[in-house]
Amino acid sequence: MSEMLRVHQLEVLYDTSQVLFGLSLHLNAGETLALLGRNGAGKSTTMKAMAGMIASRSGDILMQDRSIKGMPAHLIARAGLAYVPEDRQIFSELSVEDNLDIAFKRGPSGEDHWPIERVYEMLPLLKPLRKRLGGLLSGGEQQMLTVGRALMGNPRILLLDEPSEGLAPIMVQKIGELIQSLKATGTSIVLAEQNLHFCLGLADRAVVIDKGSDVFTGSIEALNADAQIKQRYLSV
């Protein structure tokens, strides 16, 4: 199984406050990796560091054995890594279709696996809303749009930062179904979540973060069976 992404001994600071302390993880091709931890544990910081949105003090980030540490975020995106932020950041004054069109780019080798009609097939809720302004969508619809926007860039790796956060249960279910469908296409996914139960049945492996360090790495089944780890780090 080929390796798509590796984070090695990553350390990140915000001004003088250190947030990540030697964090390490890896993502295999076609795998869904759950990045779990309480609020404030460092999940979003890890995602932003991988996407090039914040700088790291030390350590390394490798994408298919090539270091991307220190690269500008737009070059990391061109290399095939797409980041879906927790706060969505859609263009509220543009239509759904314009939000998608504006994000189009071919993959690193010229791939066009995600034309807009295929995105609509993957996200059928969006197609009847294609002319609606982004700011008029519900939270769940906006979340679907952010994933669709990421797919329009033909990524090899998809980073999903707490996609179920703040959504109604029916939309959480639909987001889970979407991740299953993306996994079935062979997409390599890092899924940052607080909710272990949401990740069961979606993720292959899990990394648990606490206070900026990785404290567990293993299969999602092993994590779910470890009551001590869940109680100590996930409050399950």
Image (spheres, rainbow, N blue to C red):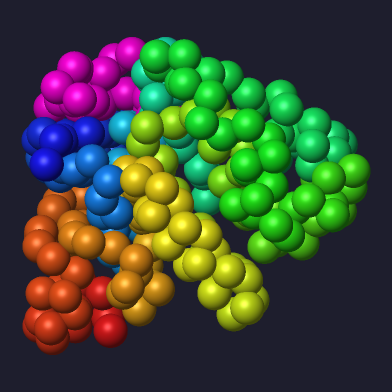
Whether residue 62 appears in this view of the structure is yes
Residue at image position (9%, 35%) is 9
Please tell me whether residue 66 is drawn above or below residue 28 in the rendered image.
Answer: above
Asked whether 36 or 17 is in front, the reply is 36
Numbered disc total: 0
Whether residue 43 appears in this view of the structure is no
Please tell me whether residue 62 is drawn above or below residue 219 in the rendered image.
Answer: above
In the picture, which quadrant includes the C terminus? bottom left
- Quadrant of residue 47 within the rendered picture: top left
Could you tell whether 139 is left or right of 4 in the image? right
Q: x, y (%) of residue 2?
A: 14, 35
Q: x, y (%) of residue 64?
A: 20, 25
- Quadrant of residue 70 within the rendered picture: top left
Q: x, y (%) of residue 30?
A: 28, 46
Q: Which residues are magenta?
A: 51-71
Magenta includes 1? Answer: no
Residue at image position (73%, 59%) is 125
Could you tell whether 172 is left or right of 89 in the image? left
Asked whether 174 or 60 is in front, the reply is 174
Residue at image position (10%, 81%) is 226
Asked whether 173 or 71 is in front, the reply is 173
In the picture, which quadrant includes the N terminus? top left
Q: x, y (%) of residue 163?
A: 51, 58
Residue at image position (26%, 74%) is 234
Please tell me whether residue 95 is drawn above or below residue 101 in the rendered image.
Answer: below
Could you tell whether 54 is left or right of 83 in the image? left
Is the magenta region chiefly helix, strand or loop? loop
